[in-house]
Image (tube, rainbow, N blue to C red):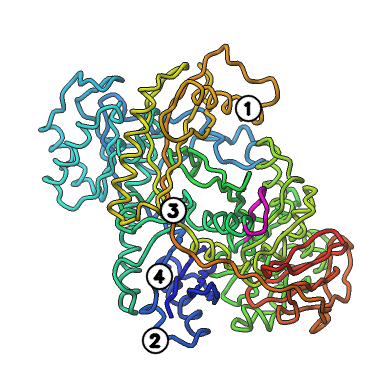
Amino acid sequence: MSYVIGTDTGGTFTDTVVMDQDGRVTIGKRSSTPPEFVGGVLDSVADAAGKLGIDDRLLSDTDAFLYGTTIVVNAIATGQAANTGIITTQGFASTMFIARAASRTNGLGTESLRRFAERRKPTPLIPRNRRMVKELRERVDWKGQVLAPLDEDQVRATVAELVDAGAESLAVCLLWSFRNDAHEQRVREIAAEVAPGLPVTLSSELAPKMGEYERMTTSAYNAAMAPVASSHLDRLEDRLSAGGLAPDRVLVMQGNGGLDRSVHVTSRPVNLIGSGPAGGVLGAKVLAEAMGLSNVICTDVGGTTFDMGLLVNGKPVLTPTAVVHQHQLYLPIVDVVSIGAGGGSIARVDEVAGLLSVGPESAGAVPGPVCYGKGGEYPTVTDADLVLGFIDPDFFLGGSMRLDVAGAPRAIEEKVGKPLGLSVEEAAAAIVEIADNHMADTMRQQTVERGHDPRDFTAFLYGGGGPLHGTAYAPKLGITSMVVPGGELASVFSAWGIAGSDVHHTHELSSPMKAPFDTDALAEVFGTLEGRARERFDGDGVAEDARVVERYAELRYATQTNVVVVPVPGGRLDAAAIEGVVDAFEQQYERLYGEGSAFREAGVECINFRVQAYGVRRKPAIARHPLSTGTAQPSAKRSVYWYELKESRPTPVFTSAGLQPGTRIDGPAVVELTTTTVAVRPGQRLRVDEFANYVITPA
């Protein structure tokens, strides 16, 4: 028997899915172990191996270990970035610190945007001082012609000064280097002579696009994360190898929704931003295709965050940029928006205003919610779920973790109930309802504000808290079809998506041109990018028949700054095909900005070009099951407080063993699974479909 392992490391739990060649799935779930996280990965894998009864040989029988991690995001959030030196062209040392005007609002939530006087530029990842940011005497123009040659003696002195100042990594971002990268390449060669082994990031390789601010910021983040990612992945691979995993079996999930070898990931660790959440969206794509669904809102409620992405016409929505701590990075990733709302979100009452807030601060895995009994003092959403009766304290994580049933209500009463004059149940219900509304607001922003009607979508509810909270937040947007994917699989769905993902490389290049576009110029640009994709495929050993290449272009109207990404047909482009690309741009523009907003008379520009290259992996088919007509019988009954009814009600409790494909349940009801809980709210009906999904609709 051979296996594929998919593992997703979150801030609170680490999830593992083990798939055999017949598609059978075994689940492992254990607490994450920050700050090093490797221990949590091994614990989670061991949990799955124990259920299979092959503790000593799972890794040796594994064909591929596919890994998604939040290590980069966690390192950024906790200030664990490496000391990084920046080398740029003379006169541009302040580029990253000046930033752009939009940086004052990038990535901020609604509440923060309302506080206009408190808006600030983002705190730079690199300290603003002359010791860590150095300028070079050199200059290349927009055509790629050298105006001032590189002073190599100055480069040697500059690298030495940065190393003496404590630089553990370098980011090189010279002006117009994406048009001519000779100077950046030479800087790296000299750095290797002066400081052998020092990681060096070149902007011309990482983000060869217009926009010196975004290019510099992306390069700086990548350089700052290089030692962190390299250390983490090296330790992980060493531990997995010691457990029997064969060499070169580890592939790492990137934020673009695809896998890459760790040797490439360690040189481009910025691509790990969005790694875990992308796995859930990729899993949703596979399952939605089997179910015949084209539009899906993917929602993942974890212990720390609520993550949301979209499938539109069967494809994940990609964004050419990512926002990290208000900085905009050139980073094509699956468009997943995250907010601080999850099971570990802390509830507090503002002593001055007397208002209850939930999140974004999280209790994380340590100390965790009060009910974990690990020293948490402030109540969380999970504590509220326990008090309301949704969680059985004796069956949390299948009974492997006992909850403190006295600590949770005591903390809610002390920190929320008494200050607001509410009973414990009322306070717990208020905590949960605020968290649910935060999630619904995020879904509304990412659909309505992008020209989508959420009522045209099915909501997938996964993560440890998605099946419990999703049946409340999705209907707030008028969504009438909700899916808990695979039932028990839902709590580890991102890991399942990672296990079923393909190899994916992204190749980009800026080569601005105005319509009507020159066919030879387009052929040259796409030829260059597709050539790079072929080289990577050859290096990865991807067979010819497993290669898929997609083309995209970023277009805008002249004098505007925002671009719209549109697909470009393959092969040689003639005038008709180019006109079709421009038409697609205008249709997408009007969908985003309103009917009649397109204005071709302004002129259309193509700024950036992109090739998405996929190496398709063979994967087992999703199992179908015959539908039965049996009636489910509850295993128990307990009191559950439903905030829609503003009261507790005796509620039937079901287990997965009693739910077979074809079974129906009318709410209110609770389905208790080993690693999550499904809430079938009043007025809703749950049906188990042929793929073992729980499909929830109005009764």
Above or below 631: residue 687: above
In the rendered structure, find residue 38 and report the number of the disc placed on it.
4
As for residue 1 lying within the magenta part, the answer is: no
Compared across the picture, whether 168 is left or right of 628 comes to left
Which residue has dot 3 on it? Answer: 254
Question: Of the residues tagged 3 and 4, which is closer to the observer?
Answer: 3
Q: Give the Cα distance between marks 1 and 2.
A: 57 Å
Above or below 211: residue 344: below
Question: How many C-alpha atoms fall within 10 Å of the one at disc 4: few (<14), some, or many (≥20)?
Answer: many
Above or below 256: residue 147: above
Q: Give the Cα distance between marks 3 and 4.
A: 18 Å
The residue stretch that appears in magenta: 290-301
Q: Residue at x 30, y 26 (%)?
A: 176
Which residue has dot 1 on it? Answer: 587
First in residue order: circle 1 vs circle 3: 3
- On the image, the x and y values in percent for residue 282 come to 54, 55
First in residue order: circle 2 vs circle 3: 2
Q: Give the Cα distance between marks 4 and 2.
A: 18 Å
Amino acid type, mark 1:
Gln
As for residue 296 lying within the magenta part, the answer is: yes
Given contact means CB atoms under 8 Å apart, are the residues at marks 4 and 1 in contact? no
Given contact means CB atoms under 8 Å apart, are the residues at marks 1 and 2 in contact? no
Question: Of the residues tagged 1 and 3, which is closer to the observer?
Answer: 1
